C-alpha cells in the first residue's frame, strides 16, 4: 500500500489518548484484588488488549462496561488468579510491558505458563528474570530467542537483585507481586536505574490499591509482605508520550491545543515540555490544557535516559530547528518494537540531515514521526507499507 500525505496546515484541539503505561498497571493491580474494580477513560490499544487477554488466561475477568462516543472504554476487572487449567498460554502480542510485567504474576498462579509473542518481542531481552530464576530455583525453558518462555515455580520473600540499566519493566513486575508474599522482601538494583519515572508510576498505582512500598535509598526498595490489593475505581490520565508529537506539530506548524493531560503527572515523558521550552519553543498553559504555538526552535543537547520514548519526536523537532540537536543516552531504543535509531534514517527522505545528532533515532510502532511533519514539506512524501505499521491516516 502506498499512501500520499499532502502538505497542509495542521491546527485545532486534540483530546490526548490515555496513558498506556498507567493502563497496563491499572489492569494488573485490579486483577490482583479479591473484588471488582472499574477503570475509566481507557483508549483501546493492542498492547492493553494483550495484557487483558493474559489476565483472563490467569483467571481474572476483564470486560468492557461501556464505550463512549469517542471510543474510550470503561473496563470492569474482577480480580482473582484462579485459572482452572493445569497449563496456561500467555500471548503477549508485541508488548514488552505485558510480558515483563506478567511473568512474575504468572508465577503466582502456581501453574506452568508459556509466554509467547510476535515480531521483535521474541528478541527483546529477558535476561534479568532468567538470572533471577536461576538464583531462586524457578524452572524455565526457552529456545534461542527470548520467547516462547515456559516458567513454573513459587517465588519466596527475600532479597531480589536486578540490573537497572536494561529496563525498569522488570522492577515493575516484581514490585507488583512481592507485597503478596508471606514475608518482607528487598528489591535492589545492581546498576544505576534508568527510566525510574516508570517505577514511580507503578508505586502510585499500588498506593491507589492500598499497597505500599518503601524506598530505602537510590535503587533499593523495601516491600512488606502479607499485603492485599483493594478494589477501586481509577480514571486514566492522558499519555505524554503521545502528546509529545502533537506539541511538536504545534511548534513546527500551526497552534495545537491538547486536552486530557494530568498537570501533576508522574510520567517521565512530561519532560517533552521542558525540552521544547529549552529549544525556545512556546507552550502556553490553561489549567490542565496545553497549547503549542509556532516557534523558531534552536538545537540543544537533550538527555533521554529517563524518557526514551521521546526520541522519535525529538528527532523530528531537531530536524526543523536551527543548529545541531544532540540526543544522548538513547541506546536502549534499539531494543524497542523496532530499532528506532536505525529507523530514523527515514528522516533524510524529508530533506533533513540527521548526521549531527548523536545516536540515530527512529519511529514508533505507529509511525507518527513520519506522518506529522508533512505539513512543513514543500512536496508530498510517499509512505510505503504503512499497513504493516497498523497506522490509520
Image (spheres, rainbow, N blue to C red):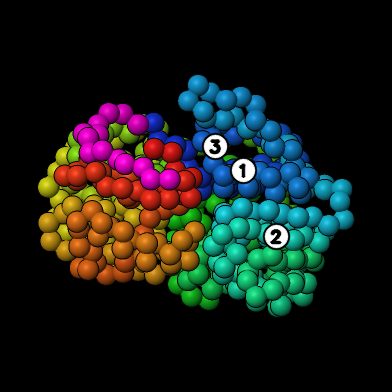
Task: Say whether residue 321 is left or right of residue 71.
Answer: left
Task: Say whether residue 220 is left or right of residue 141.
Answer: left
Callout 3: helix, strand or loop?
Answer: loop
Residue topped by disc 2: 115
**Which of the 4 image quadrants contains residue 289?**
top left
Residue topped by disc 1: 49
Callout 2: helix, strand or loop?
Answer: strand
Q: Is residue 186 visible?
A: no
Residue 67 on image: x %, y %: 57, 25
**Which of the 4 image quadrants contains residue 302?**
bottom left
Q: Earlier in the sequence, mark 2 or mark 3?
A: 3
Residue interval drawn in magenta: 1-14
Foreground pick, 184 / 306:
306
Residue 188 on image: x %, y %: 57, 70
Please say if 175 is above or below 161.
above
Task: Say whether residue 352 is left or right of residue 65.
Answer: left
> Residue at coordinates 48% horizontally, 50% vertically from top-left?
388
Callout 1: helix, strand or loop?
Answer: helix
> Residue at coordinates 60% horizontally, 64% vertically from top-left?
122
Foreground pick, 167 / 267:
167
The 10 Å Cα crowd at callout 1, few under 14, some 14 to 19, many 20 or more, is: some
Outermost residue, front direction? 1
Is the Cβ of the residue at disc 3 closer than 8 Å to that at disc 1? yes
Residue topped by disc 3: 44
> Residue at coordinates 77% horizontally, 75% vertically from top-left?
137
The 10 Å Cα crowd at callout 2, few under 14, some 14 to 19, many 20 or more, is: many
**Quadrant (top left/top right/bottom left/bottom right) for the N terminus:** top left
Amino acid at each position: 500500500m502506498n499512501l500520499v500525505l499532502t502538505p497542509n496546515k495542521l491546527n485545532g484541539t486534540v483530546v490526548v489518548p490515555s496513558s498506556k503505561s498507567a493502563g497496563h498497571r491499572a489492569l494488573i493491580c485490579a486483577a490482583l484484588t479479591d473484588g471488582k474494580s472499574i477503570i475509566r477513560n481507557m483508549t483501546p490499544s493492542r498492547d492493553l488488549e494483550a495484557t487483558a487477554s493474559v489476565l483472563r488466561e490467569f483467571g481474572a475477568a476483564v470486560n468492557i462496561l461501556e464505550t463512549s462516543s469517542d471510543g474510550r472504554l470503561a473496563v470492569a476487572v474482577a480480580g482473582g488468579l484462579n485459572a482452572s487449567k493445569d497449563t496456561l498460554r500467555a500471548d503477549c502480542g508485541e508488548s514488552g510491558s505485558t510480558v515483563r510485567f506478567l511473568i512474575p504474576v504468572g508465577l503466582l498462579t502456581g501453574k506452568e505458563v508459556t509466554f509467547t509473542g510476535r515480531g521483535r518481542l521474541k528478541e527483546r531481552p529477558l535476561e534479568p528474570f532468567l538470572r533471577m530464576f536461576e538464583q531462586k530455583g524457578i524452572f524455565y525453558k526457552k529456545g534461542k530467542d527470548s520467547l516462547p518462555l515456559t516458567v513454573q515455580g513459587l517465588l519466596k520473600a527475600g532479597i531480589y537483585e536486578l540490573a537497572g540499566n536494561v529496563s525498569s519493566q522488570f522492577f515493575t513486575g516484581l514490585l507488583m507481586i512481592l507485597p503478596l508474599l508471606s514475608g518482607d522482601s528487598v528489591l535492589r538494583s545492581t546498576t544505576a536505574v534508568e527510566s525510574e519515572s516508570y517505577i514511580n508510576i507503578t508505586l502510585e498505582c499500588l498506593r491507589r490499591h492500598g499497597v505500599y512500598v518503601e524506598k530505602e535509598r537510590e535503587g533499593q526498595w523495601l516491600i512488606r509482605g502479607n499485603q492485599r490489593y483493594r478494589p477501586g475505581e481509577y480514571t486514566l490520565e492522558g499519555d505524554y508520550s503521545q502528546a509529545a508529537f502533537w506539541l511538536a506539530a504545534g511548534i513546527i506548524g500551526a497552534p495545537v491545543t491538547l486536552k486530557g493531560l494530568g498537570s501533576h503527572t508522574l510520567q517521565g515523558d512530561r519532560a517533552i515540555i521542558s525540552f521544547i521550552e529549552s529549544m525556545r519553543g512556546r507552550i502556553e498553559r490553561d489549567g490542565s490544557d496545553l497549547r503549542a504555538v509556532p516557534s523558531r526552535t534552536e538545537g540543544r543537547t537533550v538527555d533521554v535516559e529517563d524518557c526514551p520514548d521521546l526520541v522519535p519526536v525529538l528527532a523530528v523537532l531537531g530536524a526543523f530547528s536551527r543548529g545541531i540537536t544532540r540526543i544522548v543516552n538513547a541506546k536502549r531504543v534499539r531494543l524497542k518494537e523496532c530499532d528506532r535509531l536505525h529507523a530514523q534514517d527515514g528522516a533524510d527522505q524529508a530533506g533533513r540531515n540527521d548526521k549531527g545528532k548523536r545516536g540515530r533515532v527512529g519511529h514508533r510502532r505507529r509511525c507518527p514521526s513520519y506522518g506529522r511533519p508533512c505539513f512543513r514539506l514543500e512536496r508530498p512524501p510517499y509512505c510505503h507499507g504503512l499497513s504493516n505499521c497498523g497506522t490509520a491516516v
